[in-house]
Image (cartoon, rainbow, N blue to C red):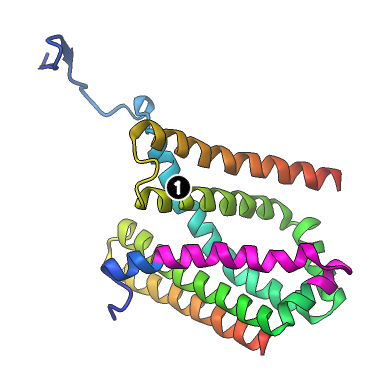
Amino acid sequence: MQRQPVTNGAVRPLPKFLNLAQIRFPVGAIASILHRVSGVVLVVALPLLASALGESLRSPQGFDAVLESATRSWFTPLLFVGVWALVHHVFAGVRHLLMDIGVGVRLSQARASALVSIAAGIVAVLVALLAWGLR
Amino acid sequence: MRVFSGQRAWLLQRFTAIAILVLLVLGAFPLVTTDGSAYERWHAMATSTHGVVLVLAFFVSMGLHAWIGVRDVVLDYVHAPALRLPLLAVVAFVLIAVQIRVLMILT
């Protein structure tokens, strides 16, 4: 078996194959890919937002119809996806902006803020679900 | 066209990000501080002179931010030129159509 020395003098076997079940992405990588996924979700939502803008300004009935279809139709599950995407994207984006000016760039801080951005998206959906259920 | 590429795109992505956040707060402020039904407050805000500029600036910022973001994602994951270019063209078409639609709604 091939062995590879590590810095403390011990040896460990090299992995013989890529075990997908054993790969663990660092939390920063998860926040990063979710930033991309949420961004794409928001791009898809943009034409819908433009439609909602036009319909909601047309008349009080149009405004109610937009709220109705957003909160009480087949579309409603997608509304919660949108809530997640918006909140995660904003948190992860602000995290990036702060890092650009040198805030929170230490590894421990970066990991903590990545976790916060992931948690914020989940909490936002839970709050939205709660508000929707209690309405 | 390489207007929004390299460092300029990177910078524009940051500026539009900040603009979107500021415009969201500015737009939400009159909605929560004025009286009337939800429709009245929304209609008054979005059709006022300030509101039209604000909503327009919001969608322009979103369009630019979305374009740079989607372009980065497509260039990273879609490698076949035969797929890449049509995909980017469709995205550009939709984003420009959204801008025209918003412009027509607000004017």
Q: Residue at x 28, y 61 (%)?
A: B79
Residue type indicated by callout 1: Arg
Is disc 1 surrounded by few (<14), some (14 to 19) or many (20+) residues within 10 Å? some
In the rendered view of the protein, which quadrant contains the N terminus of chain B?
bottom left
Q: Which residues are magenta?
A: B13-41
The residue sitting at the top extreme is A10
Name the secondary structure under disc 1.
helix
* Residue A11: quarter of image: top left
Q: Is residue B19 magenta?
A: yes
Where residue A67 appears, x then y in whole percent? 79, 63
Pointer 1 indicates a residue of which chain? Answer: A
Judge from the rendering whether residue A8 lies leftward or rightward of residue A121; answer left or right: left
Number of numbered callouts drawn: 1
**In the image, is residue A104 above or below residue A18?**
below
Q: Is residue A4 magenta?
A: no
Where residue A130 appears, x then y in whole percent? 77, 41
Where residue A122 appears, x then y in whole percent? 61, 40
Q: Which residue is mark 1?
A: A95
Where residue A51 appears, x then y in whole percent? 67, 75
